[in-house]
Each structure stands twice: as structure tokens, then as C-alpha cells.
Image: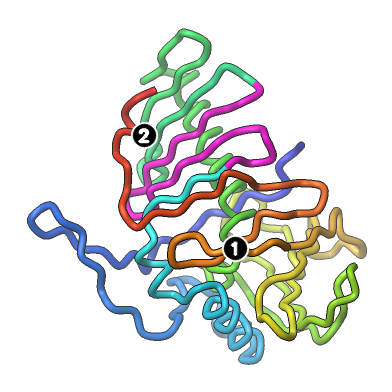
Amino acid sequence: MKNPHYLLFSFSFLVLIACNQQLKTIQIVGNPPAAGFDLVNSDAQAIAIADEVVTASGGRQNWENTRLIKWNFFGSRKLAWDKHTGQVRIDFLKEELKIIMNVHTKKGKAMRNDTLFTEGPVYEKLMDKGESVWINDSYWLVLPFKLKDSGVTLKYIGEDKTLEGSPADVLQLTYQNVGKTPNNKYLVYVDKTTRLISQWDFYTTAADAEPKFQLPWKDYQVYGPIKLSGDRGKYALTEIEVWKMGQERLFVEW
């Protein structure tokens, strides 16, 4: 499947400090926007609904305290992400390729077949590939916590029903000078009762009259302190796991 969207994630509100080699959390109040969120052009109702989505999904504090997330992206690759350090491991399931990298520094290593890459043109291309895969694949999983990211303009479109007939409030996400495909647009359906995302519609450009796809967000389950959905209709995010602490060996051993 061709990845429909790549969006650079903001880490401006990373809330960790190192002290005696231990990570301590700083208390978060509310759901503050990331630096660079388009507050001026976003409307108050959309922002309020985005905050409700975060609360329904476990809350901002629990999201910040969550450290390691693992998942299987459509049977194509497995990912492990230490969101406190930026370390990411990607095991490709349909080609002989493994990537371990830090998405903040874009440094790491890659193993294709039996060849290790730690420098050079091929290495640089594989680091770019790893970053793009992580951006795309994590967005499909943790969008509820990214509605007020850097570069996002958030608008309330109104009430509508999902393809399955459930009433929802619809938010529009557009992007300004961020990510690898900043012309994309999403319509995000927020369930009237649960306040969880129940569907998203993807537009290749904001000017498109019809979406490229419309997919449900179903089968929410509690993982650690947060709720995540893995059911995207004809697609599935599986083997989802969440821990508060990291597992460093994942990012050093093949």
C-alpha cells in the first residue's frame, strides 16, 4: 500500500528531565498545543473538541507518561517507538530490511540482507526511509494525540454521520509548511457519545472535492494508560503494546 500521508510530528512539549539517570515527569495541565500550532486560524469549537478527544483517549498526562509503543502496520512492518528518546526500530516484513534510528537526529543503522549500513549514500537514503515510515505509520495509530500539532490548522465543519451511520462532529485538519506532504487534508469524525475518533477521510490536497479514502476507527482498547484503535476497516494495526518504561535492547540488537 502506498503511504497516504507523511507528517512531521512535533515534540515541543516533551515533558521529561534527566536526573541521576532516571526520567521524571512534569505535571501537564490541560492539553496545551504544540509550538507552531495554528491557533490564530483554528476555531475555538474545533480546539475544544480536540481536547475532548484527548481526554476520552486517556488524557494528555497519560500520553506524556507513555514511553514505548509497539505495533504491526498492516502486516508490512513492525515498529517500536521510544517516544521519550526518539529511538525507533522498524522490522520490514516483506523485504530483508531492518532500521534502528533516532528520529530526532536521523542517525542510526540499517541492515539490508546481510549488509550493515552506518554511513554513505545508501545509509542516508535508508535513514530517510525510516523517518518517513515512522511518521506515516505512527500517525495512523496515535492521531488522537496529534490534533494540535505544529503546523496544524483545525476547523469545525459541523455535524455529520460516519459511513456506518453514527452521528459525529467533524473536524478538518490542514497543514502549513510542515511535513513531507503539507497539502494533505483530513476530515476527522468524533463520535457524539464516546468523543473518540470514529472515522477519517483523507484528501491528497485540500482542494480535492472527494477523499482518496474513508476509513473507520474501531475496536478501541486500553493499552497501558491510554486508548488506541487498530481497526481501519480493510486494514488493521495489530500487535499493539504500550509500556511506561522503555526496552533499550530493542534499539541495539537485531
Instruction: Determine the image quadrant of residue 202.
Output: bottom right
Alpha-carbon span between mark 2 and mark 1: 24 Å
228 or 31: nearer the eye? Answer: 228
The span picked out in magenta is 72-94
Please report whichever mark, 2 or 1, sits nearer to the chain's N-terminal start.
1
Relative image position of residue 18 (x, y in whole percent): 16, 58
Would you say residue 152 sits in the magenta stretch? no
Residue ID at (76%, 83%):
169
Q: Element type at marker 2?
A: helix
| In this view, the mark in front (2 or 1) | 1
In the picture provided, is 64 more to the left or to the right than 179? left
Residue, disc 2:
250
Q: Element type at marker 1?
A: strand
For the stretch drawn in magenta, the main secondary structure is: strand
In the picture provided, is 95 more to the left or to the right than 128? right
Relative image position of residue 188 (x, y in whole percent): 73, 71
Would you say residue 88 sits in the magenta stretch? yes
Residue ID at (34%, 25%):
253
Residue ID at (34%, 79%):
28
6 or 240: nearer the eye? Answer: 240
Identify the image quadrant of the C terminus: top left
> Are circles 2 and 1 on residues that touch, CB within 8 Å?
no
Q: Which residue ends up furthest to the bottom in the rendered image? A: 44
Identify the image quadrant of the N terminus: top right
Relative image position of residue 127 (x, y in whole percent): 47, 31
Q: Amino acid at mark 1?
A: Gln
Instruction: Determine the image quadrant of residue 227.
Output: bottom right
Residue, disc 1:
221
> Would you place residue 202 above or below residue 149 in this image?
above
Please tell me how crowded label 2 is: few (under 14), some (14-19), or many (20+) other residues with Cα within 10 Å: some
Q: Amino acid at mark 2?
A: Leu
